[in-house]
Image (cartoon, rainbow, N blue to C red):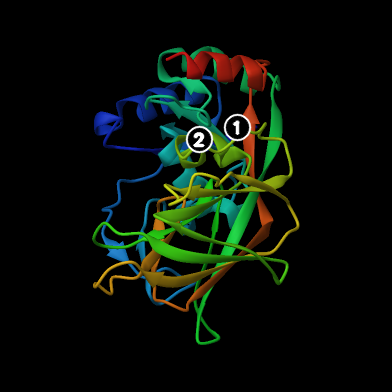
Amino acid sequence: MDHFYIITNYQKDTEGRTAFAIQAYLEEQGKTCYVHERLSESPGKNRKGTDAIRFHYTDVDKIPSDVEGVLVIGGDGTLLRAARDVVDRKLPLLGVNMGTLGYLAEIECGSFQAALDQLLAGEYHVEPRMMICGEARRHGRKIFEDIALNDIVIMRNGRLRIVDFNVFVDGEFLKSYSADGVIISTPTGSTGYNLSAGGPIVAPQASLMLLTAIAPHTLSSRPIVLPAEAKITIEVGSSHGTDIDGAEATFDGDTSVKLNSGDRITIRRSEQETMLIRTKTTSFLEILREKMNK
């Protein structure tokens, strides 16, 4: 690779110090490197839905056409946003961690030079990661559509009370949950909210989807593993209370859409994939041991 683009989280990378240090290092090696300018995170309309909130993070139209790889500085949240922003460009991403756990962002910011040397020497591989897409409908009319690398979460909106969720798989009724919400996770997202809600950890190279209820009002609820090609439909039932706040679906915690009783969201495997650059030979189990012991 000779042409790079840097996306940095300016809240963590104060004044872009790490971004500009990486840019300078790459340019010393004779490479071309661009740094994205700071954008305000003001709410806007999502390009695929009208009843949604989108916090723009990266203006993909400003990424030069000659860019071959993207370096993402921040944490897993920054990388998730960047992955969704640039997915149509099919650019591979390398994460530089300035966050806490950093399952996705593989390089620690204090040791980026060694990783960049490997990258420039061709000592890396590109790992595809499965993504999912969700389409929300109201009275049969599509109100929102977006993709996610980690998960799509449908949960109560507003005051504390449980909501009924009816789950269908490939058109067949599976079960109903009375819970705070339901998580549909990819293998990549299994170490995120899914893990906190008691779901299983899955190797990121796997091809499947995980269905995990959030705080279900039962003693017998268990996470469910489904094939990657399954079509999962979640129907929002009634809330157990007097309010009409309804529910909300969020995509990687970045975009969201309000849902009313009777609305449905259908989740399936996306045709898009996120491509992650890996310079380390560390196995998933080694990473898991390290991160889980923190």
Percent across and percent down for residue 115 are: 56, 17
Q: Which residue is mark 2?
A: 195
Identity of the residue drawn at 50% across and 87% down: 139
Percent across and percent down for residue 135 are: 56, 70
**Measured Cα–Cα span from mark 1 to mark 2:** 7 Å
Q: Which numbered disc covers residue 201?
A: 1
The one of 191 and 22 positioned closer to us in this rendering? 191
Q: Is residue 219 above or below residue 238?
A: above
Callout 1 amino acid: Ile
Q: Residues within 10 Å of mark 1 (few under 14, many from 20)?
A: some
Identity of the residue drawn at 25% across and 30% down: 14
Callout 2 amino acid: Leu
Rendered-image quadrant of the N terminus: top right
96 on left or right of 18: right
- Mark 2: secondary structure: helix
Percent across and percent down for residue 64 are: 52, 50
**In this view of the protein, can residue 6 be seen by the observer?**
no
**In this view of the protein, can residue 31 be seen by the observer?**
yes
Identity of the residue drawn at 55% across and 41% down: 189
The mark that comes first in sequence, 1 or 2, is 2
Q: Which numbered disc covers residue 106?
A: none
**Residue contact between numbered discs 1 and 2, judged by CB atoms under 8 Å:** yes
Percent across and percent down for residue 147 are: 55, 59
The one of 196 and 68 positioned closer to us in this rendering? 196
